[in-house]
Amino acid sequence: MLYRLPTSLNFSKSRECMCGCGELTRVAPKTDNRRGHVKGEQIFFIHGHYRAFGEQNANWKGDDVSYKGIHKYISIRYPKKNKCEHCDFKGFTEYASKDHKYSRKREDYLELCVPCHQKYDTKMALLRTKTDWGYTVQ
């Protein structure tokens, strides 16, 4: 991404890193479009520093997050072990919500292989009161 502020803003020679750490950034020695650096202008982030993650980020939506957003959050925060919690298959797995009420808690999800995930979702759709998975559907 290119992080460039309008040139009409007059910055002093040193500016704080935009990650919020308070350290001063340096002036770019050469233009590097890949990194968004322009020769002679301040760099926005110190190498290794990034925008705030999670609740510290200005774009944090809390519980009002989209389906895609919650899945991205879960996959970043809780790396998969690639082992199905139902049949012990080792390989590609997916997170399946236990009650289809998407939250940010790991304990509300099962790590299942694709066939088990499809079977689980099918059983959830039938709204049975008890499943062989051991979870009550309401």
Image (tube, rainbow, N blue to C red):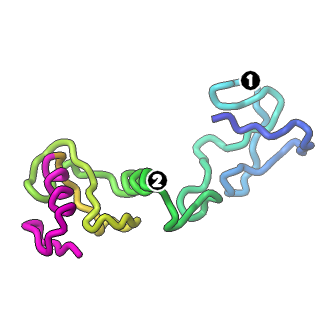
Quarter of the figure with residue 70: bottom left
Q: Which residue is mark 1?
A: 31
Residue 45 falls inside the magenta stretch: no
Q: Residue at (69%, 31%) from the top-left corner?
A: 36
Which one is in front, 8 or 45? 8
Q: Position of residue 16 (x, y in %)?
A: 76, 51
Q: Position of residue 109 (x, y in %)?
A: 28, 63
**Dot 1, crowdedness within 10 Å: few (<14), some or many (≥20)?**
few
Quarter of the figure with residue 37: top right
Which amino acid, mark 1? Thr
Quick one: which residue is furthest to the front in this view? 126
Query: In the image, is 41 to the left or to the right of 115?
Result: right
Mark 2, secondary structure of its residue: helix
Relative to residue 62, is residue 1 depicted above or below?
above
Q: Earlier in the sequence, mark 2 or mark 1?
A: 1
Q: Which residue is mark 2?
A: 69
